[in-house]
Image: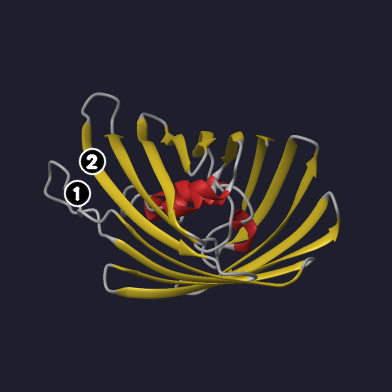
Amino acid sequence: MAWLFVFLSAFEFSCGSGPAGAMLAGGAVADWRHGLWHNPALVDTFPGAGAAAVGCRPYGLEGLTWATTALHFHHRRWGASLGAGSMALGRFRESDVQVVLAGSPAARTWLGVGTHVLLLNPDGVNSDFALSFDVGGWYAPGRFALGAAAASLNRPRWQDDEEQPARLTLSVAWQLVDELLVAADVIRQAGNESVACGTEFRLAPPLCLRAGVLTAPLQYAGGLGVRVGVLGFDYAWRFHPQLKGTHVAGLSLAWH
């Protein structure tokens, strides 16, 4: 019955992609992939085109799969990303198709909005859908950055009148030196607060080591990122105190 834990609230499980996969904190970390899962304003932080794909088996549960793909485009002061994610177990499937748009209205300031089409198919026959909206901002005057985001801001409801709770996040990131980044997110959802803290250490130009911790419930993560030319590989291992660990692997392409 452990799989029921995953589905107590639809669309709550998300590993995302990019450094936050292992850092656990990403709302103020400049990576366009974080714009899809943490803060829509971050979509505009990469001046180029990109593509990414991520997959895992959540908590090592047999038959349960989770995967996402994303595309990114940037033009002058604007960036846009399109993402699609899906979790499946037998006939159960939930999907999330999203479009995120972000721009820079002022120096060192970025704002973004996101729209999600949430699709729920619990038994292979019946289906439900809802629209969800995100907003976010990011301010980076130098090595220090601040972020704020609200996900599911409209609190969409399903046919059974169950509400998708809004998630509010305040974030900070600090590039202490070129080789070391630290970040933290404070998250509030459904009246509960949690904190995520993470770090990324650039061991060598193509290799980064990452680690993070999340409270409520307590979780740990570690991983690495490797980039050679336009090709990138990200790996994260997440440990949950009540369930098995989750191995997350992703590939990305980035063109400046």
* Residue 30 percent coordinates (x, y): 58, 56
Q: Residue 97 location, x and y as percent?
A: 37, 34
The total number of labels drawn is 2
* Residue nearest the viewer, comparing 219 with 29: 29
Q: Which mark is residue 28?
A: none
Can residue 252 be seen? yes
How did the renderer colour the structure?
secondary structure
Looking at the image, residue 6 sits to the left or right of residue 73; the answer is left
Q: Is residue 30 left or right of residue 64?
A: right
SS class, disc 1? loop
What residue does disc 2 label?
131
Tag 2, which secondary structure?
A: strand
Amino acid of disc 2: Leu
> What type is the residue that disc 1 sits on?
Pro
Which residue ends up furthest to the top in the rendered image? Answer: 125
How far apart marks 2 and 1 lie (CA) works out to 6 Å
Q: Are marks 2 and 1 in contact (CB under 8 Å)?
A: yes
Q: Which mark is residue 156?
A: 1
Q: Which residue shows up at 59% across the image and 51% down it?
A: 31
Residue 180 is left or right of residue 94, and the answer is: right
- Across and down, in percent, residue 121 comes to 28, 32
| Picture residue at 33% right of the left edge, 62% below the top | 167
Disc 2 packing (10 Å; few <14; some 14–19; many ≥20): some
| Mark 1 nearby-residue class (10 Å; few <14, some 14–19, many ≥20) | some
| Quarter of the rendering occupied by the C terminus | top right
For marks 2 and 1 on the same chain, the one whose residue lies earlier in the sequence: 2
Q: Position of residue 85 (x, y in %)?
A: 45, 36
Q: Classify residue 118 by image quadrant.
A: top left
